[in-house]
Image (cartoon, grey):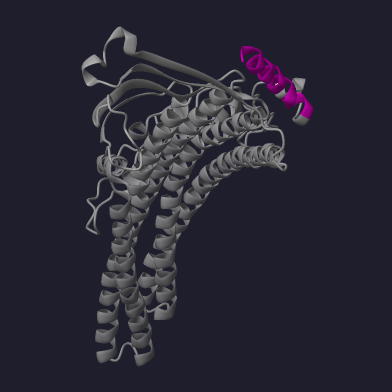
Amino acid sequence: MRRLFFLLVILCLVCPFVFGQKKSKKDKKKYQRPRIVAPENLDRNEPAPETDPQTLADVKWFEVFRDEKLQALIREALTYNYDLRESVARIDEARASLGITKSDQYPKVGASADVVTERRSRDGALQVPEPARQTRTFGSILLNLLNFEIDVWGRLRKATEAARAELLASEEARKAVITTLVGDVATAYFNLRELDVELEIARRTLTSRQETLRIVTRRQEYGVSNMLERRQAEELVFDAREVIPDIERAIQQQENFISYLTGKPPQSIERGQELTAQEVPPEIPAGLVSDLIERRPDIRAAEQGLIAANARIDVAKKAYFPRISITGFLGFESAQLSTLFNPSRWVWGFIPQVTQPIFTGGRLKNDVRLTQAQEQLLLVNYERTIQNAFREVSDSLIAYRKFKEIRIEREQLVFTLQDRTRLAYLRYNGGVASLLEALDADRELFDAELSLARVRRDDLVSIVFVYKSLGGGWQ
């Protein structure tokens, strides 16, 4: 019997190389990070900067965004946001899945006990001999070793490695959600403060235009002005009045969005610093390209997925090799309960088993192909994630520098239009120019002030995008 068992083991060791795949040197290599062609510099506006390992992403989010009301909103979002809570649940799911997969490496031991009482009839079809008892009770108590697989080839260890990588990927995904969430709340808050500025400009402009209309109406009554000028003044009043409810609509919807991000029902949002009073970092260092790959959680999550896929290929390949398992039991059994625990009632069993796939209709081969194709998909995703990160950083740095230039020019334009409007009304009141010239200047000033408010918002939001693209905010 022993010779037969050892002969079966030798046969199973040979079969993988006959019916399966031989392990090449390439198969024995451990996971290596794919090579990525990275740009020398993330900031295209500075083609030859000095090497600076520091980056804005190393700063904590509450040091980047100094507005106390904004900080309070971000803290609420980090506690109650639905996407973040979902990502935490996914981590728990992955951790439990790792525990289940890892448990396959350990023996499963169970206990069983049974007591059987039976009675047989003397007059039935099955005759009981005279000395035998019609009623008898017997039982057993056993510890069972439930089909424990000896991981000779490391198949179970590789499966555990894949599950551990998936757990790490879910943890990195949570960090990516935090980065996105911090950026979304800050962006939404700056949008809200910009809308507040627009509403203030619209109300101030409406008040000014209503005063102009009152003056034009009085001038018409005294015959100094005419109906055309009055209609032109009324047109600007109606135009400013129309803008106000639209801005109020946008404000309330933006408040609803911020409430959603913080996990609350729609409600008013407390304001902090004015849009122009927001503190911004004096410099925006991008840091090293290599640090970006190590720091951005979405890149690290993509790499952990690639590591898991690499391990699953090994699991699929090791399915060609025999599985050696052990089943056994240890305990007591007796025909009488009173003698169940006597040393003479001691029983045990040991059942080694070797299983070797010989013909599976191509299932094992296609399992390997499937895992290899999945690895290629995840490799493409990893490379795409890195290149997208490079693009986002470059885009955000370009936007940061260009919006600052636009803001400076727009401020000068607003100053010029304010002076032009003042001079135009002086000329009109002095009878030198028509009202149309003053109203045109007023209209252009109103549009320029609204545009300046939006550019100031974009300037702040560009800092948020730089911070987010560099992988900051999750620390």
Q: Is residue 133 above or below residue 360?
A: above
In the image, residue 13 lies in the stretch drawn in magenta: yes
Q: Is 426 displayed left or right of 371 in the figure?
A: left
Q: Looking at the rendering, which quadrant does residue 322 occupy?
A: top right
| Vertical side of 154 occupied by 185: above or below | below
Q: Kindly indicate the quadrant of the structure image that contains residue 330.
A: top left
Is the stretch drawn in magenta largely helix, strand or loop?
Answer: helix
Instruction: State how many labels appear.
Output: 0
Furthest residue toward top: 343
Residue 435 visible in rendering: yes
Depth order, front residue of 115/143: 115
Residue 336 at x, y = what percent?
25, 20
Q: Nearer the viewer, residue 14 or 374?
A: 14
Residue 215 is situated, as x and y percent measured from the top left of the image, at: 26, 80
Q: Residue drawn 28% across and 25% down?
A: 139
Q: Which one is in front, 337 or 118?
A: 118
What x and y, as percent, mark residue 408? 48, 48
Residue at the extreme right = 18
Q: Quadrant of the C terminus?
A: top left
Range of residues picked out in magenta:
1-18
Quarter of the image for residue 136 reads top left
Q: Which residue sits at x=51%, y=26%?
A: 160
- Residue situated in front as seen by the camera: 427 or 175: 175
Residue for point 44% across, 60% down: 451
Query: Magenta span has 470?
Result: no
383 relative to 403 in the view: left or right? right
Residue 56 seen in this snapshot: no
Give coordinates of residue 310: x percent, y percent. 63, 31
Quadrant placement of the N terminus: top right
Q: Residue at x 40, y 74 (%)?
A: 438
